[in-house]
Image (tube, rainbow, N blue to C red):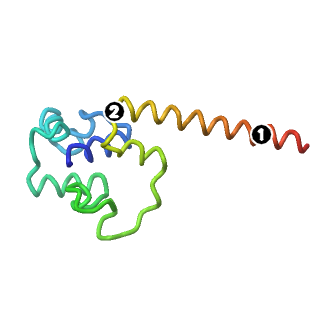
Amino acid sequence: MLANRLKYLRMNLNMSQQEIARQLKMSKQVYNNYELGKREPDYETLKKIAFFFNISIDYLLETTNNPAPQGQLLPKPTMTEIILSDNDLSEESRKDLLKQYELLKLRDDLKKRNEKAAEE
């Protein structure tokens, strides 16, 4: 859904709706309605959004999962990106899963440090 993609892309840039709206030269309310799925952008606006995020319109419209414009290949998504884009989970569950993921990474990092210290 376009609304989910827009929110995901904005959050990835760590920007507010106001900041995105300003960059796209539209009101915050209009952009907010796009993210809420209350309004659909016209073709020209889709082009502006795609250009701003450097993604394809097909990605915005969910006809592909490759966000790269013109079929370019992008790097494999990070686990964080995968979790954030999983629309089958509630936002609360996504946040909880991200916290768990970060804790597991910290645990593994600590384990590696301890192993390295033990070798020295």
Q: Residue at x 12, y 37 (%)?
A: 30
Residue, far right: 120
Expressed as whole percent of the image width and height from the top left, the position of residue 64 reads: 27, 62
Residue, far front: 88
Expressed as whole percent of the image width and height from the top left, the position of residue 69 reads: 30, 65
Q: Residue at x 47, y 59 (%)?
A: 76
Q: Nearer the viewer, residue 85 or 90?
A: 90
Expressed as whole percent of the image width and height from the top left, the position of residue 42 reads: 8, 53
Q: What amino acid type should be assigned to the residue bearing mark 2?
A: Glu
For discs 1 and 2, the disc positioned in front in the rendered view: 2
- Image disc number at residue 86: none
Q: Quadrant of the C terminus?
A: top right
Residue 120 as seen in the image, left or right of residue 94: right
- Seen in the picture, residue 67 relative to 87 is either above or below; the reply is below
- Image disc number at residue 91: 2
- Image disc number at residue 113: 1
Q: What amino acid type should be assigned to the residue bearing mark 1?
A: Arg
**Occupied quadrant, residue 116:** top right
Label 1 sits on a secondary structure element that is: helix
Label 2 sits on a secondary structure element that is: helix
**Occupied quadrant, residue 60:** bottom left
Cα distance between the residues tagged 1 and 2: 33 Å
Q: Nearer the viewer, residue 41 or 44?
A: 41
